[in-house]
Image (cartoon, rainbow, N blue to C red):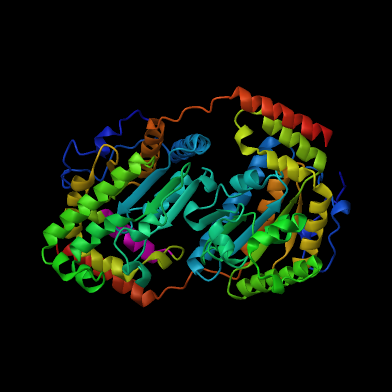
Amino acid sequence: MKDFKTDRFRYDGSTKLTIEKASSKVDDLYKSSDEYEEILRQQAAEIDKLQNKLYAHNRFGLLVIFQALDAAGKDGTIQHVFTGTNPVGVQVASFKRPTDEELDHDFLWRSWRVLPERGKIGIFNRSYYEETLVTQVHPEILTESQRLPEDATDDLDKLFKHRFKAIRAMEKYLCQNGFPTVKFFLHVSKDEQADRLIARIQDPEKNWKFDEGDVKEREFWKDYQKAYEDTINETARKQAPWYVIPADDKKNMRLLVGRVLIEELKKLPLADVEPDQVRFDELQKLIDVIKNQ
Amino acid sequence: MVRQFDMTFTTKTFRYDGKKPFASADTPTLIDPLYADEADFNQQLDDLSARMDQAQNVMHADGQYGLLVVFQAMDAAGKDSSIRRVFRGVNPSRFQMAPFKKPEKEDLKHDFLWRFWRELPERGNIGVFNRSYYEEVLTLRVHPEQLTKQLIPENLLPKDNKVLWKQRFGDIVHFEDYLYRNGFPIVKFYLHVDKKEQGKRLIARLEDGEKQWKLSESDLEERGFWPEYMRAYEDTVNGTATQTCPWYVIPSDDRTNQQLLIARILTELLESLPVEFPKTDAKEAKKQIAEIKKQDADE
């Protein structure tokens, strides 16, 4: 695999994202389909190894967030990057339209309930970021569905500022408690999205995924790009970085996501479990018990 | 115990659905290898994984069924390793795993099935229970003194515990039948391991620095109750094996065989579900494509 740096896709608050300048394409990281498969498999094995270490160490958990426009490849990326890692070590939570019960609570409530445990990788397919994305494009959600106090929605700029602050504070809190967050924005171009939606409609094995709403949302493309740019700039932090991943080529996208995850997992100070002499002596006694049973 | 099976066996050989009785002592914990060598094993398992993944993909698209897979066994029989290996090829977004340990205080404030309801899989997903409500007729049967912790009103507890276990078998059969009729078939694996083989594995675990943390003193205490557990498993399988929610008793002294058998049974089951990709409305599809093209032409 080509040697490349993931830094140029990383946003941690030290540089500003200008979405128009961020590319949705990247030079191929693989020479052939076979090579792609091989790298993907190796990456999954490495993620598996690191997750196993995470589990034995039992202090950290990793939260991985995927955000993107429809058909950018969230589902497929999660499937391909994590297939091959221990399924028990990975928890996926997919967020759809909030239910009535969820709307009866504050906007972070439903996410808290499905945060990963220590030792695990928790994946959010969409997340609380929808609360500053889709709601920024369709603010009527705030007034009609979310039933916020009236004075909270008087000034929407202020409301989103508060939300960014709440999200930053939550991610900081989680990091301090052993749960760093890594966030991916899968950046797809509008043309590529059109091709994929059309392919989805035409493929009998995929058209069940197609939702007419996806076509309607395309009308708001520019508004979404703006919302993503704001959201990423407001919530990119060292302990909770965003990665803006070129998504026009699915294979490159998956390899990049896999590479970033490996690097982020390696940053965690996971010490090897130290052998303990007292425990060792106890264990020797246990071995004798079994032998005598 | 090594037992020669006719090599033309099907997975039915290991299936208990109420027609034939399960006798623990007469049932092998080891069979001839189903694979030629390690490469062959990996190949077979990868093929089964791919088929499982495909079948599950259709189940998810179809959206009507969910599958519950229950694993029960003595310690070190291979529950964790089987789950890890057999489901490795399955889309993690459609896989839910729930390990069950001793009930917590909150659990004990409820009926004995309560904590399991909360973890059932959604339609389209595979849910795995690593241990399950079956502990309520296994561990509890071996240690009936734990029943008092369950806060069941004394006047409702049968005087004879035998009656209680029978009642619980009935509760479980009804629960599973209900789930089945709502689109959630259940398959139950009992990983049947020999006591000596378990002893070897526990010692290996104790000697392996990376696995020591997996072992506790209480695992060894439970070994002291081996005959009681075997009796409890036998009665449980016989008391709860039904056509719709069968038990499979898997010879588990060889982990690779064990994993191949489990994968084969799950693949056959998933492929037998009456599911298909939803049909499309061709007219509607054309309209949507035209709409997308128009959006981009306008720019």
Looking at the figure, which quarter contains the N terminus of chain B? Answer: top right
Where residue B49 appears, as percent x and y from the top left, is: 59, 50
| Count of marks overlaid on the render | 0
The outermost residue toward the top is A277
Give the percent coordinates (x, y) of residue A13.
20, 39
Dividing the picture into quadrants, the one containing residue B37 is top right
Q: Is residue A168 above or below residue B212?
A: below
- Per the rendered image, the range of residues in magenta is A192-203
Q: Residue at x 87, y 47 (%)?
A: B3
User: Where's residue A208, x and y in %?
Assistant: 42, 67
> Is residue B42 visible in this depiction of the protein?
yes
* Residue closer to the observer: A195 or B206: B206
Which secondary structure type mostly characterizes the magenta part of the structure?
A: helix
Is A194 magenta? The answer is yes
Residue for point 66% across, 52% down: B263
Where residue A92 sits: x, y (%)?
44, 53
Q: Nearer the viewer, residue A172 or B78?
A: A172
The answer to whether any part of residue A246 appears in the image is no
Instruction: Give above or below for A217 relative to A175.
Output: below
Quarter that holds the C terminus of chain B? bottom left
